[in-house]
Image (spheres, rainbow, N blue to C red):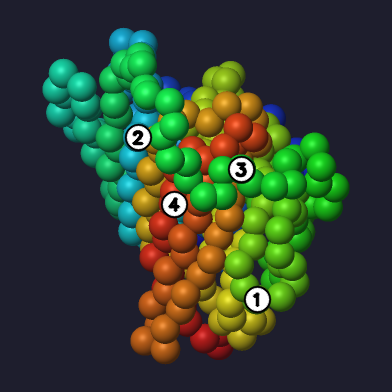
Amino acid sequence: MTHPPIESERPAAVFTRAGEAWLPSALSRGPWDPRAQHGGAPSALLAHVAESAIDEPGWQLARLTVELVKPVPVAPLATRFSMQSARSTTRLTIELLAGDTLVARGHALMLRGQALALPDGLPLASPARLLPAPQDCSQPLRIPGLPEGISFYATAVDTLAAQGDVSRPGPGAAWFRLAVPLVHGVPNSPAMRAAAAADFGNGLSWVLPPDRFLFSNADLNLHLHRPPAGEWIGLSSETQVDASGAGLTLSRLYDERGPIGTAVQTLVVRERN
């Protein structure tokens, strides 16, 4: 596999649809290998495919489980899916393929929305908001060990550090927003924005020195109890690792109004050669 060309200017979108193929640009690149995508790019693409599979309005993404079977290459991709529909739920299994090779699989649960008159005084998640809000943050998030240049992290997403010190190990919080369309010619939906941001948890809350260890995630489990409002998605994340080589990152997701859901990543922890 050859490295993708280095663009002199930022591409217009992370993916372009060409018939049945999805063509990723350099904006999809991840931090570990310029030939492989950041997990947020295929996760958001799978959210888009799930939403696009239902023609009827009023449905929302409630859960997206992404299994990163192999590194997703910066190369043409194809999707195929199966769907089971009921009155209030639709379940989809979506396969993402590079040629004949399965590289990722998504399991999506879509819920039919229904307006409810909820009683007053329901308990709120704690904390009720992620502060400071984006307009009160000024410093971009710069995760140690991640390269600069055209990539999903450095170019496709705007970041703002909110809590913690990302130069030190431990929990952290930050705001994320897509700076470009995920799919050329398609508006970024709330679910696409949430899926793109949710994969940043393990970098935001790292606990091992990145110059000595790799801690890539093998999956992403995103749960949304409501669609996010606005462009900014907040993550408050913490990571646990074990000497067995396994780890876990838990992230609480926010918009500027309050909590919107959670995300969990299973980490594969390895010493660098």
Along the polypeptide, which appears first: circle 4 or circle 3?
3
Residue on which disc 4 sits? 263
Mark 2 is on which residue type? Answer: Ala
In the depicted structure, whether residue 227 falls above or below residue 202: above
Q: Nearer the viewer, mark 1 or mark 3?
A: 3
In the depicted structure, whether residue 212 falls above or below residue 96: below
In the depicted structure, whether residue 142 falls above or below residue 43: below
Residue on which disc 3 sits? 129
Instruction: Please name the residue shown 65% across and 56% down the image.
Output: 173
Along the polypeptide, which appears first: circle 1 or circle 2?
2
Q: Which mark is residue 169?
A: 1
Whether residue 215 is visible? yes
Q: Residue 62 carries which label?
A: 2
Seen as rendered, the residue at the extreme top is 56
Name the spot of residue 143 as percent of width and height, x first. 70, 64
Alpha-carbon neighbours of circle 2 within 10 Å: few (<14), some, or many (≥20)?
A: some
Along the polypeptide, which appears first: circle 1 or circle 4?
1
- Which one is in front, 195 or 227? 227
Q: Is mark 4 on a helix, strand or loop?
A: strand
Q: Which of marks 4 and 3 is in front?
A: 3
Q: What is the distance, in whole Å, between disc 1 and disc 2 at their CAs?
A: 31 Å
Name the spot of residue 129 as percent of width and height, x first. 61, 43
Are dots 2 and 3 in contact, CB under 8 Å?
no
Instruction: Please name the residue shown 42% across and 89% down the image.
Output: 243
Seen as rendered, the residue at the extreme front is 121
Q: In this view, does 93 lie to the left or right of 144?
A: left
Q: Is residue 52 left or right of residue 84?
A: right
Are dots 4 and 2 in contact, CB under 8 Å?
no
Whether residue 150 is visible? no
Mark 3 is on which residue type? Answer: Arg
Are dots 1 and 3 in contact, CB under 8 Å?
no
